[in-house]
Image: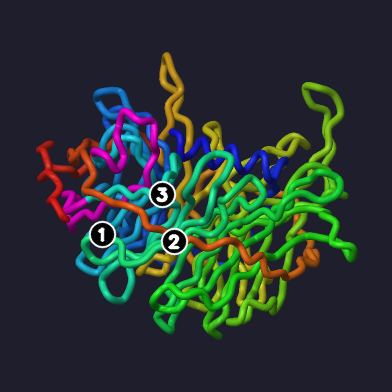
């Protein structure tokens, strides 16, 4: 779990207090009869399964990825293919021991590609006994069998992970994440050919604790280039507070940097007055970009606000908005407490009508107390909310990670929810499919929160000019194979239903690629 732990560590140390807030659902139309809506829990044979990402597929279904526990007791990747009604079509354990997928992407041949991190690497590149964590990419065929998987390491990095991957128009892939060590971590981007071999790669920053950086999201642009978004630091201000900025870089088709820009929360004297970070980026219809993430203000109580930045193709800001629900005070276990009702956006995807789907964390208000819960919303092209709500029931889902528009007009998203067994508490993937207006089939787990106000975060552009290393790294075929698994499906408002999977059988071992 080193990759996930490292991300959490960086999040807490660089942007403390990322609490969040939810909002209210606006249900204005009936559910279209052509869309099968569902809210289900999915777990593998060992039950304990944590969600990471989900993407709609061309057949109207979706493919989800997360981490489960193998029969041998160690964490491995778990991939789940669903049809349009939420029925499991196939599922696979993927990767060697201690493999953690973080992103999934359907491919043009009907298969999928996964990216993440692993400590169960390959020989000299990523010795499983060395404690080194390497980035990991795996290509699966239409039925879930592994076609190839590779590990990646740059220089002397001891911690490298891929947070996002997308297929490119040439049949290859672009992948983004971070590379380095806990105290010197840089933003990493790589272009891969269709077999997973590196065509080019670069690392931004990471030479010391003063220029930390990380890419959370990457996309190919309409002109054949690429854009990546994440965060970077720029040392410390006079008060000793580390500056955290949203960080976006645009590349040409061969990896040349067209521009790199940081979006910083500073005052007129350039003193740090808060932080910002980008978690997701998509290209807008006008050629610019929409960035989603979080914004903090040191003058406010501990907490973060939802952040959207609309960028010009040049990287200049067209508009910027933070969404804030004010402050809620309540009597807690340690006395009177106050928290900011904002939020944290993990994913942004364009919807067919030109708007944007958002997923992340927010607050639900129950018995006058704000609770952090999974959150889903939609804005129009100008950043105005069309609907938003939080999800929770007797079981708790604290975040929605991925979101997307399905081929039948629905909206699908994923989080992790606890399953209460007689003698233990385990986790399962929580997958929700809604209609385009945010409606869900009748159940009691959709809740209203405080209404959100629009604030101007007043982020300032600067050019960080981070050191760029045209990384001369190494990659190799990764260890491990895949194994078809059973699926346990629990309807949120119903009983356990049988999975349509065929009998278990081993999948083919990964093919070797040089």
Q: Nearer the viewer, mark 3 or mark 2?
A: 3
Query: Which residue is tagged 2?
Result: 189
| Image coords of residue 370 (percent x, y) | 73, 39
Q: CA distance from mark 3 to mark 1?
A: 19 Å
| Residue 24 showing in the rendered view | no
Label 3's element? loop
User: Which comes sooner in the sequence, label 3 or label 1?
Assistant: 3
Q: Which residues are magenta?
A: 123-148
Label 1's element? loop
Residue toward you, 214 or 432: 214
**Is 509 placed left or right of 82 in the picture?**
left
| Image coords of residue 88 (percent x, y) | 26, 47
The image's mark for residue 155 is 3
User: Which comes sooner in the sequence, label 1 or label 2?
Assistant: 2
Residue at image x 21%, y 40%?
Answer: 479
| Image coords of residue 349 (percent x, y) | 50, 66
Query: Which residue is tagged 1?
Result: 196
């Amino acid at each position: 779990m080193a990759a996930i732990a490292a991300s959490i560590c960086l999040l807490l140390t660089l942007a403390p207090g990322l609490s969040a807030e939810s909002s209210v659902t606006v249900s204005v139309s009936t559910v279209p009869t052509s869309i099968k809506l569902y809210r289900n829990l999915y777990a593998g044979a060992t039950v304990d399964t944590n969600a990471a990402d989900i993407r709609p597929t061309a057949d109207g279904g979706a493919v989800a990825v997360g981490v489960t526990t193998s029969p041998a007791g160690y964490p491995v990747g778990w991939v789940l293919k669903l049809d349009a009604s939420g029925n499991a079509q196939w599922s696979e354990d993927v990767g060697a021991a201690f493999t953690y997928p973080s992103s999934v992407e359907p491919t043009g041949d009907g298969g999928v590609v996964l990216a993440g991190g692993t400590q169960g690497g390959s020989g000299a590149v990523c010795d499983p006994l060395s404690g080194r964590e390497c980035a990991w990419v795996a290509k699966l065929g239409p039925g879930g069998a592994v076609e190839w998987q590779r590990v990646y390491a740059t220089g002397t990095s001891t911690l490298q992970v891929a947070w996002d991957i997308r297929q490119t128009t040439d049949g290859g892939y672009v992948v983004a994440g971070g590379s380095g060590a806990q105290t010197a971590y840089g933003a990493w981007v790589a272009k891969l050919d269709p077999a997973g071999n590196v065509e080019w790669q670069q690392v931004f920053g990471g030479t010391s604790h003063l220029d930390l950086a990380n890419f959370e999201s990457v996309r190919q642009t309409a002109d054949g280039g690429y854009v990546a978004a994440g965060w970077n630091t720029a040392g410390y201000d006079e008060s000793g507070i580390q500056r955290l900025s949203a960080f976006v870089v645009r590349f040409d088709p061969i990896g040349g940097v067209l521009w790199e820009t940081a979006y910083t929360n500073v005052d007129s004297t350039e003193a740090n007055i808060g932080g910002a970070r980008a978690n997701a980026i998509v290209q807008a219809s006008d050629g610019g970009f929409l960035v989603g993430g979080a914004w903090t203000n040191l003058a406010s109580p501990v907490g973060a606000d939802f952040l959207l930045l609309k960028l010009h193709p040049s990287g200049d800001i067209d508009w910027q908005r933070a969404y804030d629900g004010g402050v809620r005070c309540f009597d807690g276990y340690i006395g009177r407490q106050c928290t900011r009702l904002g939020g944290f956006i993990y994913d942004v995807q364009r919807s067919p009508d030109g708007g944007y789907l958002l997923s992340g964390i927010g607050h639900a208000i129950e018995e006058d107390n704000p609770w952090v819960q999974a959150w889903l919303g939609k804005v129009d092209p100008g950043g105005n909310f069309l609907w938003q709500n939080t999800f929770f029931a007797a079981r708790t889902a604290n975040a929605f990670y991925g979101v997307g528009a399905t081929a039948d007009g629905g909206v699908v998203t994923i989080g992790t929810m606890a399953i209460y067994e007689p003698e233990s508490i385990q986790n399962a993937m929580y997958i929700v499919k809604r209609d385009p207006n945010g409606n869900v089939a009748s159940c009691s787990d959709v809740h209203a929160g405080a209404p959100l106000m629009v604030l101007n975060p007043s982020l300032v552009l600067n050019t960080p000019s981070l050191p760029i290393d045209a990384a001369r790294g190494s990659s190799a075929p990764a260890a491990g194979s895949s194994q078809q698994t059973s699926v346990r499906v629990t309807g949120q408002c119903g009983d356990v239903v049988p999975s349509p999977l065929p009998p278990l059988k081993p999948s083919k071992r990964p093919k070797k690629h040089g």
